[in-house]
Amino acid sequence: MPAVEGGGTEAQAKDVCLRLLTDRARSRHELETSLAKKGFSAEVSTAVLARLEAAKLVDDAAFAEQWVHSRHTYSGKGKRAIGLELRNKGVTGAHAQNALDQIDSDDERARATELVRKKCRTLRLPSPNDPDARAERDKIVRRLVGMLARRGYSQGMAFGIVKSELDALGADTEDFDGEHLG
């Protein structure tokens, strides 16, 4: 929809918001930004968003909880990455923190472990007799730790999980300076 001449009416702004909300829940900030891009005045946007909040169609606390659950469960994101996404969507403070508190360190560790196990199913560990086994193992470790880091998991947690999972697959990771994989 092109910019609205003269700012547009509240009815038009409400229609824009409702269309956006049919795709997925959105934060108040996301809706304000969309209305501003379409040329609606701040007064019209504020009035429409206040009515939508009163009708419980816009609720940053509920949005944050839904976003955290969805991104952690289905995208495998860690708390740090989800927190950044919430900030980018304009959800900060208590709403963001309460939603992020849904994920405890055990949940985060379990999800990261699932991601590594899934990735490990497609990996081929080098043979212990391979002269390049150590370099290949280290490359695999970097890839797996990097995958978790991009999803917002701490480096320490990522490294610990990767080491544990590679140990379970028979890789010798007791000393990453070791001579070969087991």
Image (cartoon, rainbow, N blue to C red):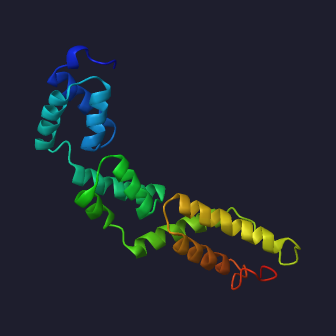
Residue 123 horizontal/vertical position (percent): 71, 64
Q: Residue at x 15, y 42 (%)?
A: 53
The quadrant in which residue 25 appears is top left
Numbered circles on residues, count: 0
Q: Residue at x 37, y 47 (%)?
A: 88
Q: Is residue 121 visible?
A: no
Q: Nearer the viewer, residue 41 or 98?
A: 41
Q: Is residue 14 left or right of residue 132?
A: left
Q: Nearer the viewer, residue 47 or 136?
A: 47
Residue 52 horizontal/vertical position (percent): 15, 38
Q: Is residue 78 visible?
A: yes
Residue 132 horizontal/vertical position (percent): 85, 70
The quadrant in which residue 69 appears is bottom left
Q: Residue at x 42, y 76 (%)?
A: 106
Residue 162 horizontal/vertical position (percent): 61, 73
**On the rendered image, what quadrant is the C terminus found in?**
bottom right
Q: Residue at x 66, y 76 (%)?
A: 166
- Name above or below for residue 31 compared with residue 181: above
Seen as rendered, the residue at the extreme top is: 5
- Name above or below for residue 156 compared with residue 99: below
**On the rendered image, what quadrant is the N terminus found in?**
top left
The quadrant in which residue 142 appears is bottom right
